[in-house]
Amino acid sequence: MSVAVLGFGKSGQAVYRLLKRKGYSVEVFDDRITEINQSGFFFGKKAEVFFKRDYDFVVTSPGIKPSHRFIQSALERGMEVISELELASRYAKKPIIGITGTNGKTTTVKLVESILNTFGFKALACGNCGVAFSEVVDIDAVDFFVVEASSFQLEFTKEFKPHVAAILNIDFDHLYWHGNMENYINAKRKIFKNQNEGNYFLKNDNDNYVVDSKSQLLIVSRNDSNADAHIGDNSVVVNFEKQFIIDKTRLFGLGNWENIAFATLICLVLGVDKKTIREVVREMDNLEHRIEYVTEIDGVKFYNDSKATNLDAVENALKSFEKKKNIVLILGGKHKGESYRRLLPLLEEYVRAIVVYGEDRKQILQEIGEFNPMPLPAINIWGVVRGAFEVAYKDDVILFSPGGSSCEPYKNFEERGKDFKEEVFKFKEEYDAAPLV
């Protein structure tokens, strides 16, 4: 059988290797890569040959939009188009735990992996959080694949069927790729579409969408104390089977209590005991770039929340602190279409000053312009760190929680967060070395 792989980034490379291991005839197309001379690889302008060829099916990479001319051409010519996630799942011999959501996916995946392994299972985290599913699907010494599934990957699934599936939350995001909110939600919903009575689906009751699945439904709630897992004040009350409470963890942030609730229910349905869950949750630390404590300079604490690429994540970050109005909030990056004005009520409760940076700083400043005092503009991370510290008082918190996606010169939130931390430590050295006046 012949297969076309669209895109040759990390995902496309993993797909290529899996297909070759399975004996397929594979050709690769990527019109974003500079042309090279290698048999079976069509890059740059040479990728145009795709329009003249037919394949048994096409595997597309997450970075390629459904509207891309290659995908549209394949569909018009009757070729099946699937994602790397779908391809790998067809070769999975062990149960899949599929976790998606706008925020919290990676933390929940890592938490589930750690709990299962501590209990004695052999679990492997993969997917959007790091190593591609296709890279590890052939490993036999695994009891569960814990898969972080993005909406991009779910869009082109057909048979994907996790034994346990969860949608942690859904917020305004990725519309540049999906086109509208309805398409985004429908992509997320594909995680449970093929489940049956022997499977489990976990839902956040804050999200409104139809669950048209025969799977066993479990609910996580911030409002309903009778839900399978209820988020309380710095605790999770689990009502599934026999009630118990989790109230100790090193994880910081309101959103992490939700992540704990989902991870707990997932592990309970897989047979893990409460003692193991409590032990792992107690020792789990925040992942990098997720309300991550950086350092303290002269009584001012810095937190890196670069992973906050949407406004829901910013709201969760703010609510993770006390209402002392002692936060200097750094917003910015690339605007995603939802007005930052939505944040104003929370800004009034938690924030004393704001610094805005990035390519869309003018639009953001306009949307929150009525905040008092007037938000300060900055051009880059260097200016952000120094501007935020300039307006901070002792005992303040400087929170880097942009709310927008990464923009030049950063490829992703990881690069952005690392640069923020580096600038904070550089400034700390300068500050500590400066003579007292």
Image (spheres, rainbow, N blue to C red):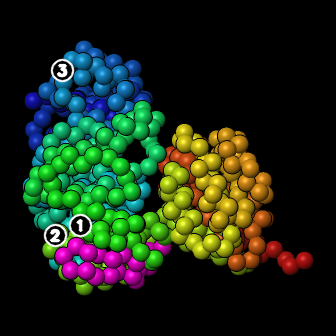
Q: Quadrant of residue 105?
A: bottom left
Which label is found at residue 270? Answer: 2
What is the quadrant of the N terminus in the image?
top left
- Which mark lies nearer to you, 3 or 2? 2
Query: Disc 1 to disc 3, how far (Cα)?
Result: 38 Å
| Residue 285 seen | no
Q: Secondary structure at mark 1?
A: helix
Q: Measured from the top left, where is residue 141 in percent x and y?
A: 12, 65
Vertical comparison of 78 with 81: above or below:
above
Vertical comparison of 424 with 197: above or below:
below
Q: Measured from the top left, where is residue 421 in percent x and y?
A: 59, 64
Q: Are marks 1 and 3 in contact (CB under 8 Å)?
A: no
From which residue to which does the magenta span run? Answer: 235-252
- Disc 1 marks which residue? 266
Q: Secondary structure at mark 2?
A: loop
- Disc 3 marks which residue? 78
Query: Disc 3 to disc 2, how far (Cα)?
Result: 40 Å
Q: Categorize mark 1 by other alpha carbons within 10 Å: few (<14), some (14-19), many (20+).
A: many
